[in-house]
Image: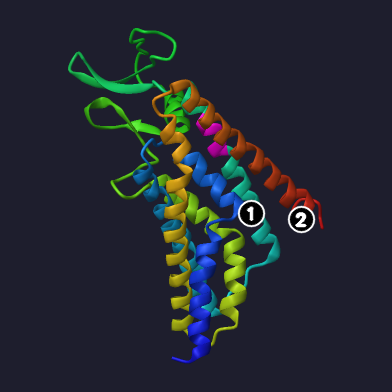
Amino acid sequence: MEPTIWAVLTLGLLLGVRHAFDADHLVAVSTIVSEYRNPLKAIWIGVSWGLGHTTTLLLAGVLVLTIKLSLPNRLALFFEFAVGIMLVFLGVQIFWNIRKKKVHVHPHEYEERSHWHIHSHADSSEHGHHRGFKLRNWAYFLMAGIVPGEHGHGKLVGPGKPFFRLKSYVVGTIHGLAGSAALMLLVLAGLKSTWTGISYILLFGLGSVASMGAVTFFISMPFSASARMPRLNQIVQMAAGTLGIAFGLFLMYEVGIGEGLFGGG
C-alpha cells in the first residue's frame, strides 16, 4: 500500500474523530443523553449515533464510487434544513417528556376483551383511566418516546435494545445525509480505488463512533450528577431542550435564508 493511501486512510480516521465535535451533532446527542442517568449507558448513545452516521455515509459512498453520483448543492442544503427540524423536534420532545413524565399504559381485561389504558401521575396522585386507547393517546407516546411494553408498562423507544439506541441511530443517519455526505463526495471523487474509498469511509466511521462515545459519556455528567435532585435535573434537561430548539431554529434560518434554500439564491 502506497504511503499516499496510508495518509488518506489516516486522514479519514482523524476527520471522523473531529467530526463528532460539530455543534449540531453535540446538540442532538445532548437532547438524547438527557433521558439517561448513567454515563456508561450514555456511551452507547454516541456509539449508536456513530453507527447510524456511518451507515448513511457508506451507502452514499458506494454510490459515488460505483456510479460516480454527485450531490446537488440544493439537495445538500435541504438535508441540512432537515437536521434543523430534527433538532427542534428533539428539543420539544424533552419538554414533552418533562410534562408527561409519569404517563404510562397498561392492559385491561373487560368482558373477555383486552384493551389498553393510559393514565398519568403528573396531574393526580390516583390512577386516572381513559376508556379505550384513542388515536390521540398515540401522540402522547410518540412525543414522549414511549410505546407499550411488557406487562403493560411503557418503555422508551429511544434506548432500543441493550447496547443499541435506535433513536440515536436514526438521528445519526439523518446527520449523515447532511454536510458530511457532501464532504465525503469531494474526498471520494479524488480516489481511484473503490476499496480505498470504502476503507476511508469505514475508518471515518470508526473515528466518529469512538469519539462520539467518549463525548456522550462526558455530556451525560450533568444529568447524572443531578439525578438525585429532581428539580435541578429538570432544569438541566430544560437547558438541553432549549439549546436544541434554539440551535435548530438558527440552522433552519441560516440554511433557508442565509444559504438561499428558500430565497432563490
Chain part drawn in magenta: 89-94
Q: Residue at 61% of width from left, 33% of height from top?
A: 242
Looking at the figure, which quarter contains the C terminus?
Answer: bottom right
In the rendered structure, which disc, 1 or 2, sits on the residue that comes first in sequence?
Answer: 1
* Residue that mark 2 sits on: 259
- Quarter of the rendering occupied by the N terminus: bottom left
Badge number at residue 60: none
Q: At which x and y percent is residue 217?
A: 42, 47
Q: Quadrant of residue 149?
A: top left
Amino acid type, residue under disc 2 in the picture = Glu
Whether pointer 1 and pointer 2 mark residues with C-beta atoms closer than 8 Å, the reply is: yes
Residue labelled with disc 1: 80
Splitting the image into 4 quarters, where does residue 184 fall?
bottom right
Residue at (69% x, 64% y) in the render = 73
Three-letter code for the amino acid on which mark 1 is drawn = Glu
Q: Is residue 102 left or right of residue 245?
A: left
